[in-house]
Amino acid sequence: MTNSYKIFIDTGCDIDPELIKGDYVTVIPGSYTVGSTLTKYDGIDDGENLTKFYDRQRNGDVTQTIAITKEVFENTFSRLVRHGVGVIYIAMSSRLSNQYYFAREVKMEMEAKYGELPLYIVDSRSASGGVGILAEIAVANKMSGYPITTNVETLNTIAGNIKSWFYVNDLDFLRRNGKTSASKSFIGTLLGVKPVLEVTSQGELHQIGKKFGAKKACEMLLELYVENKKTAKNCPIYITHSDDYESASTLKGMVSTVSSGAIVKIKTLSPVVGAHTGPGVITIHHLPEY
């Protein structure tokens, strides 16, 4: 048990950049490609480069992600834990990325060499702003004096309770990654329908409806939020978007109307996530009282 520890996330997480700049959380950088161009992403860039990324998607450029390697995980963790500094790594859902498993393998290999280490891998069972909420809770717990083991126990209890809903312009980007069928993708694209999905408590994607146009889709996201709107005390609500700030701002206004005083944060969707969802995505994430 240690009170000296650091909190890590990957770029499947969208979080207030001030927490990164202030060294409250540390991002393990991820990489993505647009066409033949390889770019490293550290979780902070929220401006012109991300707009260019989503514009290139609109223009038909193929976008892909490159998983964080076991070597990167080992280098990141070993320089701390071998000197007694603990690590909590909050990974994007294990149902959506292999990075949780890579990190777990590194933990087991390191402990086979050095014995038990203060290294904890948390499956967020979420993505984007849902992971951001979990990371903010981890930071708050640490600042309140939680030892690392208590913090991890709390995070594991909360993971799966965070509610995440989103809509996409069409399902084609998800179809390419085996998340939905080709026929549904074609119909969504043809009719201009916005498929609405949730991240389940197990961290999987599940389509729950469809709406015509961004306004109706935002209204459905609001309805889903209202059904679960007793947000846990002091927890932020995250709205993320893939280059559609106008719709994200509209949804924020809707949420603020039904939940005055709520802490609502808007963040551009990480390209490591956006590579698989495409432009025009709007998400909402919050933690209900549990």
Image (cartoon, rainbow, N blue to C red):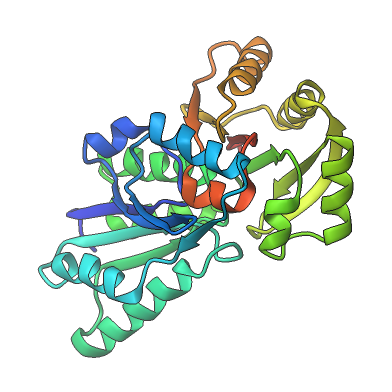
Relative to 116, 164 lies left or right: right
Position of residue 198 measured from the top left corner of the image (x, y, whole percent) = 72, 46
Nearer-the-camera pick, 280 or 165? 280
Residue 76 in sight: yes
- Where the C terminus falls, by quadrant? top right
Q: Nearer the viewer, residue 181 or 157?
A: 181
**Residue under the point 48% across and 46% down:** 271
- Residue 251 image-quadrant placement: top right
Q: Is residue 99 above or below residue 161?
A: below
Q: Is residue 244 above or below residue 86?
A: above
Name the foreground residue: 3 vs 97: 97
Q: Measuring 61% from the left and 38% from the top, which residue is drawn there?
A: 279
Judge whether 200 appears above or below 100 on screen. above
Q: Indicate whether 159 appears above or below 119.
A: above
Q: Is residue 72 left or right of residue 61?
A: left
> Where is residue 56 drawn, in percent x and y?
53, 42
Task: Depth check: give the residue in front, 247 or 289.
Answer: 247
Q: Residue furthest bottom?
A: 112
Where in the figure is residue 184, as x and y percent of width and height?
Answer: 87, 53
Which quadrant is home to the N terminus? bottom left
Report if residue 127 is visible in the image: no
Residue 233 relative to residue 184: left or right? left
Query: Residue at the location (22% across, 34% down)?
Result: 22
Q: How many marks?
A: 0
* Residue 6 as seen in the image, left or right of residue 163: left
